[in-house]
Image (tube, helix red, strand yellow):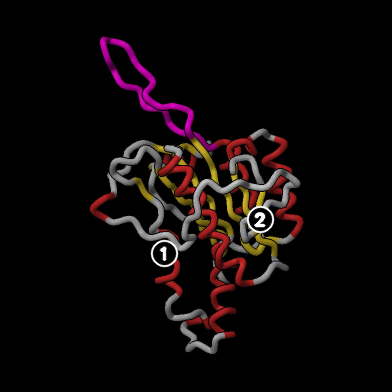
Amino acid sequence: MLGRIFNGSGKPIDNGPPILPEAYLDISGSSINPSERTYPEEMIQTGISTIDVMNSIARGQKIPLFSAAGLPHNEIAAQICRQAGLVKRLEKSDNLLDDQEEDNFAIVFAAMGVNMETAQFFKRDFEENGSMERVTLFLNLANDPTIERIITPRIALTTAEYLAYECGKHVLVILTDMSSYADALREVSAAREEVPGRRGYPGYMYTDLATIYERAGRIEGRKGSITQIPILTMPN
């Protein structure tokens, strides 16, 4: 899965070989039992000093980036993918510092409702700077079916869960733009003639978002972790 590009429904679009499945998983997943969560301690660095110093991201944490139309959130997301990595933990033993961390870091990047120019920007940026080999990229375009936009973050998180809990990797999941996801949820809700809530969004939107955000974390007895950085543009 790493180094590959998929559409919003998980089909390869990079002219590479087909994916041979090792397991079939439910993309809806499930939230982590609070009693099984382990306290996040080690850090993931983004390479952006204002984040790493002022608002450090621990492995297994979820931290949003709020943006607005016209601001460079896509460039920041690409920069995080280029520069992100694990902060290695050194432990003392026999007066020596031993590196206790292996190079087991991966990124799952899901872009929802983006135009073709933005999709090409992400593909070109990841390929040119060499970060593509550790990235799994999901691209849902603005002209793709709305229902595909709803399953894209779930497919991305299912991929992250496999890499984290089966392969033992520390996975950073970047979801952009969650506002497009919420708009898709509103469109589907209107088509189903459900009672709208504030701004026309369905009343269950926050519960639905929780099923995505609560899949971040670390589980006791598992080596890997899932860290989320959802990006959303604030509505006018």
Q: In the visual, does 130 lie left or right of 89? A: right
Query: 189 or 81: nearer the eye?
Result: 189
Q: Which mark is residue 158?
A: none
Query: Which quadrant holds residue 147?
Result: bottom right
- Give neighbour class at mark 2: few <14, some 14-19, many 20+ (Cα, 10 Å): few
Q: Image height check: is 47 above or below 27?
A: above
Residue furthest left as drawn: 35
Residues in magenta, as a range: 84-104
What residue is drawn where x is 66% and y is 55%? 11
Q: Earlier in the sequence, mark 2 or mark 1?
A: 2
User: Are the residues tagged 2 and 1 within 8 Å (C-beta)?
Assistant: no
Q: Which residue lies under the disc numbered 2?
A: 11
What residue is drawn where x is 26% and y is 50%? 36
Nearer the observer, disc 2 or disc 1? 2
Q: Quadrant of the N terminus?
A: top right
Q: Quadrant of the C terminus?
A: bottom right
Q: How many marks?
A: 2
Separation (CA) of disc 2 from disc 1: 23 Å
Of helix, strand and loop, which one carries label 2?
loop
Q: Position of residue 143 (x, y in %)?
A: 72, 68
Q: Which mark is residue 211?
A: 1
Label 1 amino acid? Thr
Asked whether 30 falls inside the magenta stretch, the response is no
Q: Position of residue 69 (x, y in %)?
A: 63, 63
Q: Position of residue 210 (x, y in %)?
A: 40, 65
Q: In the visual, does 102 lie left or right of 16? A: left
Q: Image height check: is 130 above or below 186?
A: above
Q: In the visual, does 152 lie left or right of 102? A: right
- Give neighbour class at mark 1: few <14, some 14-19, many 20+ (Cα, 10 Å): some
Query: 206 or 221: nearer the eye?
Result: 221
Label 2 amino acid? Lys
